[in-house]
Amino acid sequence: MLAAERREYLLDLLARTGKIVAKDVAADLGISEDSVRRDLRDLAAEGLCQRVYGGAPPASPAVVDYDAQQTVARGGKRKVASAAAAPVRPGSSVILDGGTTALAVARALPKELACTVITHSPTIATALIDHPRAELFLLGGRVFKHSAVTCGAAAVEAAQNVSAELCLLGVTGVHPEAGLTTADADEAEMKRALSARAADTYILASCEKIGTASPYRVLPWEKITGLIIDADPHDTAIEQLKTLGVGVLVAR
């Protein structure tokens, strides 16, 4: 089979099953695993898959700069944000991650709601300035401009000194095997630090992130309370997550 034909085969397999397992492809095509891995490196270089041990799931389309993120899946993010904002009750405290979905959550909070919001996103803090009854705590540190959040050692240390009832985290990839992932190692560490300071952690994921992966693992499934999504609840990846015992809340 020619290289171009293998490429089409791999892309079709990725679209149909949501993953490529190198040893299975090698056996099916009668080629070496090294050949498959070379093909996967080429696809990963084009941003078409995310290489992991043994194969590759689709790469997340959410790995773009902050301005570009605001144009991706706007309707889905609003649905997820509305569902995520509902549990924030009067007098409660919430840790709100950065990113455009979390920003949509901030905008979905009732203006007169009395609550405490802890965030490492200057953008989210600014969005809540005109909420007169919301107490705001902005965690300082190095500003990661790609996502408009603070991260690094100072931000992680600041996170260790707060606590909340609820943490709402964004990720760029949600995949049954690759797990909950994001594109930057420092951001992944910060997300873990934030989640560790809350009683419950929910992952915010609009449909374009489901079944995809990024390079850095954020949390294992057992560390989260559930997912808030706008995807089809019968999507193959979602069905697989349910079999793992992951709680899934579908935003309407």
Image: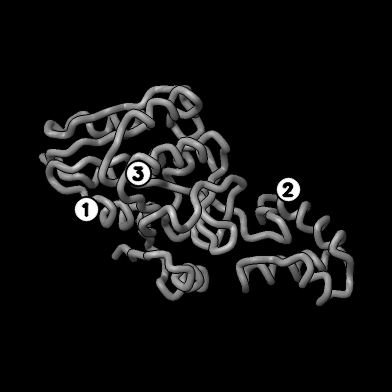
Quadrant of residue 91 within the rendered picture: top left
Tell me the CA gap for discs 3 and 2: 29 Å
- As helix, strand or loop, the secondary structure at mark 3 comes to helix
Which residue does the numbered mark 3 point to in the structure image?
Answer: 102
| Viewer can see residue 164 | yes
Q: Is residue 65 left or right of residue 109?
A: right
Circle 3 or circle 2, nearest the eye: 3
Front residue (pair 180, 106): 180
User: What amino acid does circle 3 point to?
Assistant: Ala
Of marks 3 and 2, which one's residue comes earlier in the chain? 2
Quadrant of residue 51 within the rendered picture: bottom right
User: What amino acid does circle 2 point to?
Assistant: Ala
Of marks 2 and 1, which one's residue comes earlier in the chain? 2
Which residue does the numbered mark 1 point to in the structure image?
Answer: 87
Front residue (pair 122, 196): 196
Of marks 3 and 1, which one's residue comes earlier in the chain? 1
Front residue (pair 231, 116): 116
| Viewer can see residue 104 | no
Tell me the CA gap for discs 2 and 1: 41 Å
Quadrant of residue 56 within the rendered picture: bottom right
Which residue does the numbered mark 2 point to in the structure image?
Answer: 45
Could you say where residue 135 lies in the image, as x and y percent from the top left?
19, 31
Circle 2 or circle 1, nearest the eye: 1
